[in-house]
Each structure stands twice: as C-alpha cells, then as structure tokens.
C-alpha cells in the first residue's frame, strides 16, 4: 500500500522547507512529506510534530541531539531504520504499519535506547 501511494505522490522532503533557527518546537504536520531527509541538525529542537504525512521511514533524518518528543502518527512508517533516537524520551507512531507489529514496543526501545519513557 505505501509504495502505491508514494508512486502517485511526488517526493517531498524536509530539505525543501525553511527551518527557522532557535525553534524548540518544529511542526511539519500534514504537508505530504515523504522524507525527513535534509532537515539538518537543529540543537534547539525539543519536539518534532510530523503527523499525517507520507513518511515511510526515518532514513536520512539527521540526529537531533536534544530531541525529546517525536510525534509521527498517521504516516506509512514500516521500520525504525534510520531513527537517530538516543535522546528521545517519547515517541508516538499510532496509525503507522510499524505500530501494528507484535514487537513494536521492544523495537522502539532498541531504536531509542534507555531514555525512552513513553511509547
């Protein structure tokens, strides 16, 4: 299903969006994004809201060393591959194929590490 939707929708990544330096909360909701590639590293970002896009993975997502919360509900994410999650304390992925996996919570802990408190 994910591949079919993406073929009909042109590729659109974070690199095509302006990012204002100094923001602690970054919202890229419902923009039809297919990738987080090109977002760059923003040490001030603590919360990222990326719900209701067309994201299939975290590949190309540069490490956000102070990112505490990642909201990526209602996308097409199938794996944690590419998630630089060492600082993440809370991750929300409901409505993604990955959240239907029987080992979803275990995979989230493996991807994000011991700082993860909320799944």
Image (spheres, grey):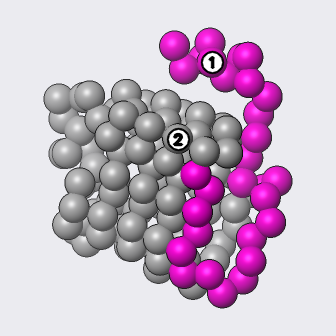
> Residue at point 54% right, 34% down?
56
Of the image marks 2 and 1, the number of the one nearer the N terminus = 1
Residue that carries the numbered disc 2 in the rendered image: 52
* Circle 1 Cα neighbour tier, 10 Å, few/some/many (<14 / 14–19 / ≥20): few
Image location (x, y in percent) of residue 103:
19, 35
> Residue at point 50% right, 47% down?
51
**In the image, is residue 74 part of the stretch drawn in magenta?**
no
Q: Nearer the viewer, residue 36 or 29?
A: 29
Q: Residue 108, relative to residue 103: is it above or below? A: below
Q: Is residue 104 left or right of residue 17?
A: left
> Residue at point 19% right, 45% down?
105
Task: Return the mark for residue 5.
Answer: 1
**Visible residue check, residue 63:** no
Image location (x, y in percent) of residue 82:
51, 48
The span shown in magenta is 1-29
Q: Residue 39, relative to residue 99: is it above or below? A: below
Corner quadrant of residue 7: top right
Image location (x, y in percent) of residue 86:
38, 68
Q: Is residue 15 left or right of residue 29?
A: right
**In the image, is residue 12 part of the stretch drawn in magenta?**
yes
Task: Return the mark for residue 15.
Answer: none
Mark 2 or mark 1, whichever is nearer to me:
2
């Amino acid at each position: 299903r994910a591949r079919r939707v993406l073929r009909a929708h042109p590729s659109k990544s974070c690199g095509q969006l302006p990012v204002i330096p100094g923001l602690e909360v970054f919202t890229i909701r419902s923009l039809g994004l297919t990738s987080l590639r090109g977002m760059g590293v923003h040490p001030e970002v603590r919360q990222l809201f990326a719900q209701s896009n067309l994201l299939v993975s975290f590949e190309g997502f540069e490490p956000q060393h102070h990112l505490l919360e990642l909201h990526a509900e209602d996308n097409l994410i199938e794996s944690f591959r590419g998630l630089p999650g060492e600082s993440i304390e809370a991750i929300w992925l409901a409505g993604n194929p990955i959240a239907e996996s029987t080992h979803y919570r275990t995979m989230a802990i493996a991807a994000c590490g011991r700082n993860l408190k909320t799944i």
